[in-house]
Amino acid sequence: MQRIGKHTVRVGEHEDTLDLTLRGDVTADDAKQIFDFMAARFAGRSYMLVTGDMSELGHVVAEARKMIVTYARRIPPIRGLVYHRASFTAKVLTELVIRAYALATGADLPVHFVKDEAEAGAWLARRRAQLAGAAQHR
């Protein structure tokens, strides 16, 4: 686990998953450090998934959203996001951030919001199975 400001990032239970806990505002420096963590920990992977607790998310400042365009290509493609405990505001902010990522990378990125960590884990398991099935059919 690594602390970035008030936030924490770590590789999740599975090696393909980033687990985020975002607390308070996300600054441009926070965003850069989160992308640096992803680039270092997920290098060489064909994809990554993202999950996390959004219950304490503040604002994602405009400069942080712009960082996504700059840094998105440094990390493996994100093939799914599932956040739990997100407020309405956190959901709207996440949608803005994901749109920027999708524009920068051309990714078709499923995003889901669930009640708790257990539901997030179940969604991740289903998504992993979908990705494995798609890989077998290539």
Image: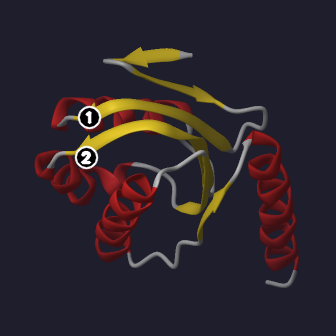
Q: Residue at x 58, y 40 (%)?
A: 52
Q: Are marks 2 and 1 in contact (CB under 8 Å)?
A: yes
Quarter of the image that includes the C terminus: bottom right
Residue 22 rendering spot, x and y as whole percentages: 43, 33
> Which residue was labeled with disc 1?
25
Pick the front one: 22 or 130: 22
Residue found at x 48% / y 16%: 2
Q: How far from the left and from the top, in percent, is residue 110?
A: 59, 72
Task: Answer above or below: position of 29 versus 84.
Answer: above
In the image: residue 104, left or right of residue 125 = left
Indicate left or right for 26 with 15 as reference.
left
Above or below for 85 versus 129: above
Residue 112 % position (x, y)? 62, 65
Dot 2: element: strand
Q: Amino acid at mark 1?
A: Asp
Query: Residue, x 73% and y 37% (percent of image)?
Result: 15
Q: CA distance from mark 2 to mark 1?
A: 6 Å
For the point 44% across and 49% down, which residue is it? 75
Query: Is 32 in front, or is 64?
Result: 64
Front position in the image: 128 or 97: 97
Residue at the disc numbered 2: 60
Type of amino acid at the residue the image marks with label 2: Val
- Residue 25 lies left or right of residue 53; in this view the side is left
Residue 44 is drawn in which quadrant?
Answer: top right
Q: Residue furthest front?
A: 88
In the rendered view, how is the structure colored? secondary structure
Of the pair 108 and 26, the residue shown nearer to us: 26
Residue 39: x and y in percent read 43, 38
